[in-house]
Image: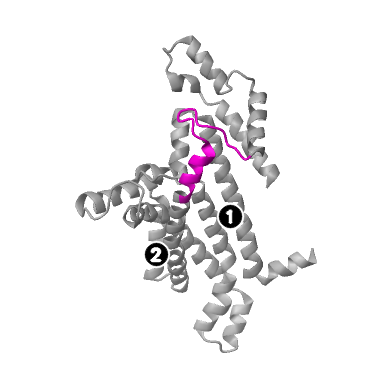
Amino acid sequence: MIPLLMGITFITFSLTKALPGDPVFSIVGERSNPEIIEKIRKEIGADKGSLRQYAGYVTLLLQGELGRSYYTNRKVVEDIGQKFPNTFLLACAAMTIATPIGVLLGFIAALNKGRAADKIITTLSVSGISMPVFWSGLLLMLFFSLRLKILPPSGTGGLQYLVMPAITLSLPALATLIRITRITVLDTMDMQYVRTARAKGMTETAINSIHIMKNALIPIITVIGLEFGSYLNGAVLTETIFGWDGIGRYAMEGIVKRDYPVIMGSLLIGTIAFVLMNLIVDIIYHYADPRVRVHGTDR
């Protein structure tokens, strides 16, 4: 993880410096007094070379700091500490919606391959993958907020503020889970041990629950982990559309303002969350599939 995170910080730092424009001008304006511009440039360290700036940033990281925002002068680690729980809550809500519905519909589609149910579910999954998040979010806002007037259009707060962002964010993951579950279950149904179980007279319910679903879990777990990890990076579009005060919206504001510490800190925390999520998925593999434990012991 450490080499990966160091590589991410270096790439992010390099790309951030390659952005057009000067953060000092974004703060004070291009017509400001040259003395003020030079003073601020020194305060934020923009007068130093790129390597010295990067070395200073790494030093801050080793001290557990992420720098200060150019605009608010607040510590980035404090801002992220306030906003990341909101992103985590939104990601959990979205995956709570997407996981059971996506797996169930994918399983139903596989069991009814070629029939009407399979075609309807497959069409819905393709629509969910193809539908842009900003479009589905605006549709929900139009229906529930402007017409029915039962949910607030934007903001951060209780359940009423969480419903529409969670549904919007869950749609791509739900559609992906439907497709992955369907494909995996169909592949598992063709395995020799499934045919052997049928030949022994096992009921279809037992075959589906013991042999098919259990052995189809690994790809499904992978998709769930990757989707959840990507959501922890910050659902930029969803958080921006609904005014959800999360890390994705925070990073977008930093990009617009060229607030380099905010951009770097947001991406770094998102990367750590994604890497940790992959680690958790690997641990789940160990318990979900005995073959992983056997091969791990052999090595």
Q: Nearer the viewer, mark 1 or mark 2?
A: 1
Between residue 67 and residue 261, name the one nearer to us.
67
Between residue 116 and residue 296, name the one nearer to us.
296
The answer to whether 38 is drawn above or below residue 261 in the figure is above
The answer to whether 218 is drawn above or below residue 249 in the figure is below
Question: Residue drawn 45% across and 10% down?
Answer: 33
Give how far across and how far down residue 1 sits, in percent: 68, 47
Q: Quadrant of residue 216?
A: bottom right
Please give the range of residues in magenta.
Answer: 64-85
The residue most toward the bottom is: 201
Q: Amino acid at mark 2?
A: Ile
Mark pair 1, 2: CA separation: 29 Å
Give the label on residue 132, or none. Answer: none
Describe the element under mark 2 as helix, strand or loop.
helix
- Left-right relation of 136 to 9: left
Dot 1: few (<14), some (14–19), or many (≥20) neighbours within 10 Å? many
Give how far across and how far down residue 88 sits, in percent: 48, 52
* Residue at image mark 1: 277
Give how far across and how far down residue 52 sits, in percent: 67, 24
Q: Amino acid at mark 1?
A: Met
- Left-right relation of 219 to 94: right
State whether residue 234 appears in this view.
no
Describe the element under mark 1 as helix, strand or loop.
helix
* Residue at image mark 2: 121
Question: Residue drawn 46% across and 59% down?
Answer: 95
